[in-house]
Image (spheres, helix red, strand yellow):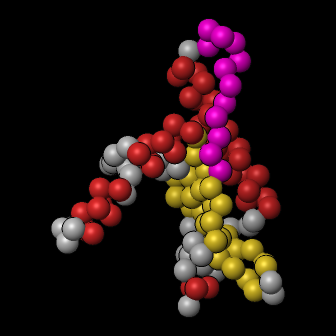
């Protein structure tokens, strides 16, 4: 059933911070972006409470503990009421740079999917 899929509905927030001054170092801007990810996740949890009945309100912090392939993002599971049904919802928060790596870098599923299409092993 579709309602049993933990990410049947998903919200992905991709954010970028502006430099506070033109000469601000890139690592300072990146640190502020990471902090903003946690802030945005806290705003999301205030609106869509973690669903403790599904996956124990699964929180995954791939920013603090990136996957070996470089993937970084914050994830948690929640639920939302729509159309008279309680839908599972996965919320993801990441920076623009994290998104680029997830979609096009080492963390991308592209090679995995292409290999599977050719009958290869992933």
Q: Main secondary structure of the magenta part?
A: loop
Q: Position of residue 119 (x, y in %)?
A: 20, 72
- Quadrant of residue 49 in the image? bottom right
Relative to 13, is 59 above or below? below
Q: Residue at x 54, y 20 (%)?
A: 26
- Quadrant of residue 121 in the image? bottom left
Work out which residue is located at the far bottom of the displayed protein and give it.
Answer: 1
Which image quarter is the C terminus in?
bottom left
Q: Position of residue 20 (x, y in %)?
A: 71, 18
Q: Is residue 63 left or right of residue 50?
A: left
Q: Residue at x 52, y 45 (%)?
A: 99
Relative to 47, is 105 above or below? above
Q: Tell me where the magenta segment starts and ends, as one range.
A: 13-24
Q: Kindly tell me whether residue 51 is visible in this rendering.
A: no
Q: Residue at x 63, y 66 (%)?
A: 10
Magenta stretch: residue 15 in it? yes
Q: Residue at x 80, y 61 (%)?
A: 47
Q: Kindly tell me whether residue 43 is visible in this rendering.
A: yes
Q: Position of residue 86 (x, y in %)?
A: 73, 83
């Amino acid at each position: 059933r579709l309602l049993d899929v933990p990410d049947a509905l998903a919200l992905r927030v991709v954010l970028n911070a502006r430099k506070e001054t033109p000469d601000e170092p890139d690592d300072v801007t990146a640190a502020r972006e990471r902090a903003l990810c946690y802030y945005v996740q806290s705003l999301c949890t205030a609106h869509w409470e973690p669903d403790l009945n599904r996956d124990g309100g699964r929180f995954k912090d791939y920013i603090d503990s990136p996957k070996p392939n470089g993937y970084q993002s914050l994830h948690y599971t929640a639920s939302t009421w729509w159309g008279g049904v309680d839908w599972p919802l996965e919320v993801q928060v990441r920076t623009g740079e994290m998104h680029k790596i997830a979609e096009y870098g080492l963390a991308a599923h592209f090679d995995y999917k292409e290999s599977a299409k050719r009958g290869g092993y992933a």
